[in-house]
Image: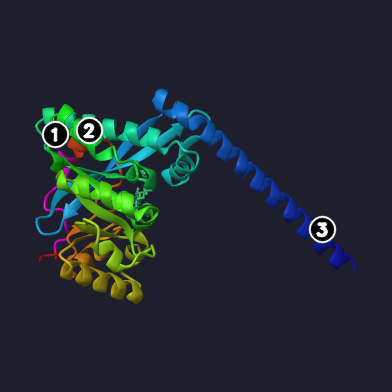
């Protein structure tokens, strides 16, 4: 019948446009991989900084450095897209090296402006299997006249588990150098606590998927509450990312979460905005009802 024919045509069409979409996607990826190397030399990368607040004091305790790439024709490309491509195409160490030097230089500038800030950086799996990383970080810290506590690391469970032995060795060396280490996106990976316990971890950063709807989802509240308890019982600090409203911030303070990060406090901002933001932001940075 005509109806069946139309339906078949419709399916054919949607299949074709699906294929076109796939092809477009594939071309975009090839283009991004091709242009990644030039991104560094053409100054298309920069770092955005997002604050974390200590719930005990209501003060900013650290900023997280998040990479940004403005492609000359494609515009802003999200890191969730280009970091993975850089990892799979063998270009990530190029980006990580640039990022490390750039962040240390930025910390140096802030220090010259009389601000002793601390920044957490995100690392990829191949950064952790590079056994020269601790030495390179030590050299950068010395070169820019920083103290090791000004740098912290965020690694995900899957990043570590790709090569547990090498990652453990690298992280142990960095921890001995005085850098704090956080497990990022905690709760989304498959590692056991037994595995994590072997790592020199200081903090668990609970994934934003459990935090975004914390004020309305009872299940998330249960998960977050027990994660905080467990972390504390293991002597770990706990950070919540993705705090988007004051109700969530209040809940997390009641649950004794140590640090908060999210759009409710501030979105990631360019380095030039950081000192001004710190000056303009009223303290304490917590909902008025939250005390602990
Ligand atoms: P991540 O390290 O887990 O960073 C948290 C992400 O959540 C960031 O996305 C941040 O902008 C976003 N975010 C922060 N607060 C909120 C909030 O309240 N609500 C919502 N909906 N989102 C929030 P971004 O900047 O797009 O980064 C995505 C991921 O890319 C990062 O996840 C990290 O895994 C990776 N990445 C970023 N920069 C670097 C880097 O320099 N090196 C490596 N290896 N990975 C990086
Ligand atoms: Mg992170
Ligand atoms: Mg995260
Ligand atoms: Mg993430």
Q: Which residues are magenta?
A: 278-288
Find out whether residue 279 is within the magenta segment: yes
- Residue 146 numbered tag: 1
Of residue 25 and residue 154, the one placed in the foreground of this image is 154
Ligand 1 is within 8 Å of the C-beta of the residue at disc 2: no
* Placement of 130 over or under 186, stated as above or below: above
Q: Nearer the viewer, residue 6 or 91?
A: 91
Residue 40 horizontal side relative to residue 195, left or right? right
Q: Earlier in the sequence, mark 1 or mark 2?
A: 2
Question: Can you give x and y, in whole percent of width and height, for residue 131 in the image?
Answer: 30, 41
Which mark is on residue 9? 3
157 horizontally vs 144: left or right: right
Task: Decide: few, some or many residues near mark 3? Use Cα within 10 Å; few <14, some 14-19, many ≥20.
Answer: few
In whole angstroms, how far apart are the C-alphas of marks 2 and 3?
Answer: 58 Å
**Quarter placement of the N terminus:** bottom right
Which residue bears the numbered disc 2? 104
- Residue 283 in sight in this render: yes
Q: Are marks 1 and 2 in contact (CB under 8 Å)?
A: yes
């Amino acid at each position: 019948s005509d109806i069946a024919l139309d339906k078949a045509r419709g399916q054919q069409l949607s299949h074709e446009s699906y294929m076109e979409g796939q092809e477009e996607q594939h071309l975009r990826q090839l283009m991004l991989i091709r242009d990644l190397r030039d991104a560094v030399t053409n100054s298309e990368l920069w770092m955005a900084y997002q604050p974390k607040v200590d719930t005990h004091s209501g003060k900013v305790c650290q900023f997280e450095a998040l990479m940004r790439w403005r492609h000359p024709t494609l515009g802003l490309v999200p890191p969730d897209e280009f970091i993975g491509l850089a990892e799979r195409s063998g270009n990530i160490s190029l980006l990580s090296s640039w990022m490390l030097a750039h962040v240390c230089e930025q910390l140096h500038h802030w220090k010259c402006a009389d601000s002793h800030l601390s920044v957490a950086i995100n690392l990829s799996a191949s950064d952790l299997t590079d056994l020269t990383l601790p030495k390179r970080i030590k050299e950068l810290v010395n070169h820019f006249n920083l103290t090791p506590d000004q740098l912290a690391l965020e690694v995900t469970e899957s990043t570590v588990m790709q090569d547990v032995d090498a990652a453990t060795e690298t992280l142990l060396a960095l921890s001995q150098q005085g850098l704090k280490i956080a497990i990022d996106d905690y709760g989304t990976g498959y590692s056991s606590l037994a595995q994590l316990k072997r790592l020199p971890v200081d903090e668990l950063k609970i994934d934003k998927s459990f935090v975004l709807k914390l004020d309305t989802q009872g299940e998330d509240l249960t998960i977050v509450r027990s994660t905080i308890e467990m972390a504390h019982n293991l002597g770990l600090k706990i950070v919540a990312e993705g705090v988007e409203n004051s109700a969530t911030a209040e809940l997390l303070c009641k649950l004794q979460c140590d640090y908060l990060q999210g759009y409710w406090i501030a979105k990631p901002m360019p380095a030039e905005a950081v000192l001004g933001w710190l000056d303009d932001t009223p303290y304490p940075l917590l909902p008025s009802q939250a005390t602990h």
